[in-house]
Image (spheres, coloured by chain):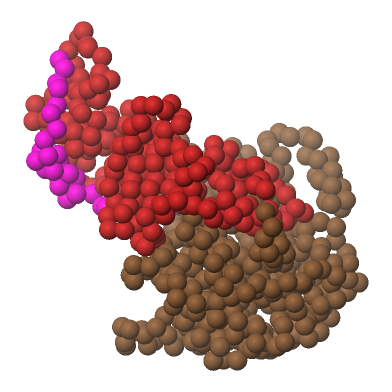
Amino acid sequence: MYSYTYDGSFEGLLTVVFEAYERKAWPTTIEPEQLAQPSMFGETVQVVTDEGKANRVWQGLKRRLSATALESLYYTYLWEQTGFERLIFDYARLVFDSPESVEGNYTAPFILQVQQIHKQVHREKHRMEAFVRFQKTADGLYYASISPDFNVLPLIVRHFERRYADQRWAIYDASRRYGAYYDLKQTSFVQLENPGVTPKQQGKLSADQYDENETRYQMLWQVYFDHVNIPERKNPKLHLRHIPKRYWKYLSEKQPRLK
Amino acid sequence: MNDKVIGKLKILADAAKYDVSCSSSGGKRKNDNKGLGNAEGMGICHSYTEDGRCVSLLKILLTNFCIYDCAYCVTRKSNDVQRTAFTVQEVVDLTINFYRRNYIEGLFLSSGIFKNADYTMERLVRVAKKLRQEEKFNGYIHLKTIPGASEELIKEAGLYADRLSVNIELPSEQSLQSLAPEKNYSEILLPMGSIKDQLVQAKEESKLFKATPKFAPAGQSTQLIVGATAESDRQILQLSDQLYKGYSLKRVYYSGYVPVSTDSRLSIITEPPIIRENRIYQADWLMRFYGFDVKEILGEANPNLDLDIDPKLGWALRNRHFFPVEINTADYEMILRVPGIGVKSAKKIVSARRFAPLHFDHLRQMGVVLKRAKYFITCQTKSLQRQDFDSEQLRRRILFGEGSVRSALLTQQLDLFRQVG
């Protein structure tokens, strides 16, 4: 029985794969250090992230997998749901131990599962690209706060960089407490810990911090939203299937009407 | 807030909303001038209206003043509605400011016809030109082509727009004559043909010269109104088929007619035919992505789609001799024709069966709807179905569940609802 712990990073997880092969000691559990419970049975292996080892595992996967499958593995990491470390490990092990490509073998349960996770995370990424609503601040920054189901902020940055190359913008993940900030040249990830406010207030702006025209455009957008609707075709079920209620908090058109 | 633009936006969004096209994909327009916007990827629906339709573009009319009197149209000359017009600058400001806040993918600009076709078209082009050249806007622009506009203007429009569209609206010449006496088919098809030629030409030239300016890279589309006139589904889909083949249209949109008029020239309906519209879209998908010919979907014996079941199931029930299909050996094309199996699961099946013989459990996990598919497939010659059913029995079992005895009664009720609706 071997319990592996790692620092929570993707490189750390790949290092776990390396160490397990090195020792021929297959993990029963893989957990981030800060969450790991001391185990009474078996051995605990504390893996220290090593970029060289992580890279060797990644290159090995790269030789045997398509770009899409590699992306699926990274998406599984960002999925963050219980058991994701194990899933990535099992997938990697199957890849390394099979003489032929295992890609597309949807009869193997975790290959199908990784593919389905890829779809889930991709959908959340796409939703964030659609539902982010920037608000312009007095100093010309376009700002939005999100709290996605999965950790998709690293995935949406490229989309917004290309789209808004000529405006400064920032997107803050309020539940994971970090943000991305684009300064017209590049995007950097930032922590804005403000101990004075509650987690819910973290990353929120007050009314006087906005551009003078911000309310006007929010209002125009609400007006537009109300007037493209065709009341004779009202279909609440379909409406909710496309924008489930948990996303309404992002959408200015779903807030009380401005006057 | 006292704001002129708010009043205009209300009127001109209201007047534009019956145009159902909202696609924002296929633009292939990259942001390589460090400007605003990027339309190279797939389309994005930024919101959904309460009627469940996608909101991806700022869809407005430049003006709802119109010299025409088409019976089906809310903007027709004889309709008693408030008239107004945006200035070019107002449209530009709205587009840019909505886009910067990530509300929209771009602009869909149409217009009532004031003075004449060229005068109107010229103004639409001016908006697009300003967005592209002055604002360095690389988002999506869909321009409506005004029938009768000169070829030079259409050509210029195509340089700035990602998509051009000419709406046919009425699915037969006869209907057009009675409902829109100022219009005729040849006048509508003329710009469509000219756009098609330009698209072909631009494509040919881009093979020779790398720097050929793009011409409407997302192609052209049109719209047909369903239910305002008496055409059958067969007539409508045959027309779409011709348009896809003859004019290489990217999309034909179908708009279930919303009664905006009590004009005596129109069919009397009280509610938009939403189910029928949905079935027509499904049939359109079968033609474009599932390899069906329009003749397989509708024929002289069945000129209209079955409203209770989707057209793919309808085809399968009429063609039982092709089934059951053996999942482990059948061609992809045939697997795609099984009710309950879509493009994605068909691809998964073909991929996974290289590794191991597939069971019904595999299919379920891959997302196949076995409730429907099980009547049409075998897995390693095994079937989930012990009995043989005729097509009518199958239809009932799929619609109302197995062993249902209330089916007959329910069908009757549904029919009643439909008559009332």
* Residue B283 image position (x, y, % from top left): 63, 62
**A127 up-or-down from A195: above or below:** below
- Colour of chain B, in one word, is brown
Residue B225 located within the stretch drawn in magenta: no
Residue A58 located within the stretch drawn in magenta: yes
Q: Quadrant of the N terminus of chain B?
A: bottom right
* Residue B77 image position (x, y, % from top left): 81, 77
Instruction: Give B268 or B216, whichever is nearer the viewer.
Output: B216
Residue B372 seen? no
* Residue A79 image position (x, y, % from top left): 36, 36
- Colour of chain A, in one word, is red
Residue shown at 27% from the left, 31% from the top:
A85
Residue lying furthest top: A40
- The magenta segment is A43-68
Residue shown at 61% from the left, 44% from the top:
A254
Instruction: Give A79 or A110, whichever is nearer the viewer.
Output: A79
Q: Is residue A12 left or right of residue A217?
A: left
